[in-house]
Image (cartoon, helix red, strand yellow):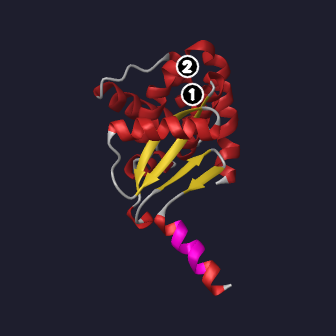
Amino acid sequence: MAELATLARPYAEALFQAAGDQSAALKDQLSALAALASDEDLRRYADNPRVPAMQVFDLMAGVALQKGLQLDGKIVNLLRTVLDNGRLSVLPEIVAQFQTLVNGRAGVSDAVIESAFPIEAPQLAETVEALERRFGRKLSARVVLTPELIGGVRVVVGDEVLDTSVKARLEQMKLALTA
């Protein structure tokens, strides 16, 4: 993973600098391209040494256009550069790092809330508000269902983890009883 992050960082930073104040507007386009790049068939096609990078670019741009996505010139340049350098597999990490840079400029951090059960919108709003007070910053939250937690939530904000799940409490009890 560290290698992917190392490869992705220069691309993300270059796009962030080139986009300037338009950075936030490019997040959706980048996310759509990352979803395309995650497709295994497309990656196999792109990794074929007999397929030129321009052909892969045309395919991706065509699929994006079919989905109603008009690519910004900066995104087009990024995609061409990534494909020319054979780094399509790094695109999702580039997007993640770019979003981190954009969020950093806006004073927002990404938060992943893992829950054993779906969280309704009003309850999610209350949870995010409490987490913002706890972590001392604005959060952009995303909920992931993780039934193994049994109950409660596990929140990851950057490198900080707040685990109030039943599973974590059971593990703590197990450690206390076996110590």
> Circle 1 sits on which residue?
78
Q: Amino acid at mark 2?
A: Lys
Which residue lies at the image location 49% right of the left edge and 19% below the top edge? 25
With respect to residue 91, does 144 lie above or below?
below
Q: Which residues are magenta?
A: 168-174
The quadrant in which residue 5 appears is top right
Between residue 163 and residue 94, name the one nearer to us.
163
Which residue is outermost to the top? 21
The mark total stands at 2
Which residue is outermost to the bottom? 178
Between residue 173 and residue 95, name the one nearer to us.
173
Res. 19 in view: yes
Q: Amino acid at mark 1?
A: Leu
With respect to residue 61, does 94 lie above or below?
below
Q: Are marks 2 and 1 in contact (CB under 8 Å)?
A: yes
Which quarter of the image is occupied by the N terminus? bottom right
How far apart in space, not on screen, are marks 2 and 1 (Cα)? 6 Å
Which residue lies at the image location 39% right of the left edge and 59% below the top edge? 116
> Circle 2 sits on which residue?
74
Circle 1 sits in a helix, a strand or a loop, which is it? Answer: helix
Res. 52 in view: no
